[in-house]
Amino acid sequence: MSYLSGNRRQIVRAAMNAPYLSREEEQQLAIAWRDQGDQAALDRLSLAHMRLVIAVAAKYRNFGLSMSDLIQEGHIGLLEAASRFEPEREVRFSTYATWWIRASIQDYILRNWSIVRGGTSSTQKALFFNLRRLRAKLSSGTTRISEDELVEKIAETMGVKVQDVATMSARLSGPDTSLNVPVLEADGSGADRQDFLVSEDPLPEETVGGVIDTERRTRWLETALGVLSERELRIVRERRLSEEGETLEALGQKLGISKERVRQIESRALDKLRDALLKVQPDKLAYCG
């Protein structure tokens, strides 16, 4: 649109010179755009409310992003509001559009303020946009308070966890830092910051190898268990394959036999398992220990 072309000064000048609309004019223009797709009506409606876009964008000028970009994003929110506005509800368009303008600008800031996306939850978003203001307000008194007390007061005021406030404060305390930034060591040698981020997790090939070995051993064991009778299988499962491991006496009571008989059946079942496993993998007998 013509009034959005050019630099910020031209945008502001065009917005300030745009005529105000009465409630009736807003209603007529909104209906013409919604029902007839009248582009001229949309142009007039949005141009008349660019003052509102600029006013909302100005509240976010301290986040280090271009004011022109904030205005453009606010304009996107304004157009979204125009497409969703329902004139028959008898609400002023400016009241309805303010929410969409603010939401569009805030989303843009969250997407571009840092390479790490923040504000993914409503709590994080509220903290991101209110933390600095609350910090300045609560620390402006004559009585000095510690950082821990300040964080607790902010958490109480916003109804969030202290840890959430501390985490967001840390994020806002400094700019993004590349992991490839050189770091000089005491001996004068250099290394990238990422070289100091050591993971304690196993290497990927070790993890994959472990998964494959576990799956293979599981198949071997399932094949070997197929040679057992129903009672032998139950005893082996409850004695050797369960987390707690049933006692001979308790298992004997369940089966209605003596614990010595349970031991004999278990011993015979383990011998059968060894023989079955030897046929599949002669060097894999760890399951029957």
Image: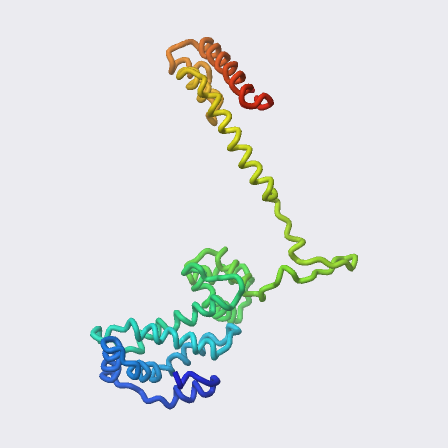
- Name the residue at the right extreme: 187
User: The C terminus lies in which quarter of the figure?
Assistant: top right
Q: Would residue 224 appear left or right of 88 to someone viewing this image?
A: right
Which residue sits at x=54%, y=62%? Answer: 171
Residue 100: where, in percent of width, then height?
35, 71
Q: Position of residue 89 (x, y in %)?
A: 22, 73
Q: Name the residue nearer the viewer: 6 or 9.
A: 6
Q: Which residue sits furthest bottom?
A: 17
| Residue at horizontal 43 percent and vertical 69 percent from the top | 106
**Where does the image place residue 39, in percent across and percent down from the top left?**
30, 81
Q: Which colour scheme is used?
A: rainbow
Foreground residue among 250 and 182: 182
Furthest-front residue in view?
279
Check the image and report above or below for 53 versus 282: below
Number of numbered callouts drawn: 0
Quadrant in which the N terminus is drawn: bottom left
Query: In the picture, residue 99 is in which quadrant?
Result: bottom left
Q: Is residue 42 left or right of residue 156?
A: left
Q: Which residue is drawn at 23% across and 76% down?
A: 35
Question: In the image, is residue 134 above or below residue 17?
Answer: above
- Locate residue 173, reporting x and y percent: 57, 65
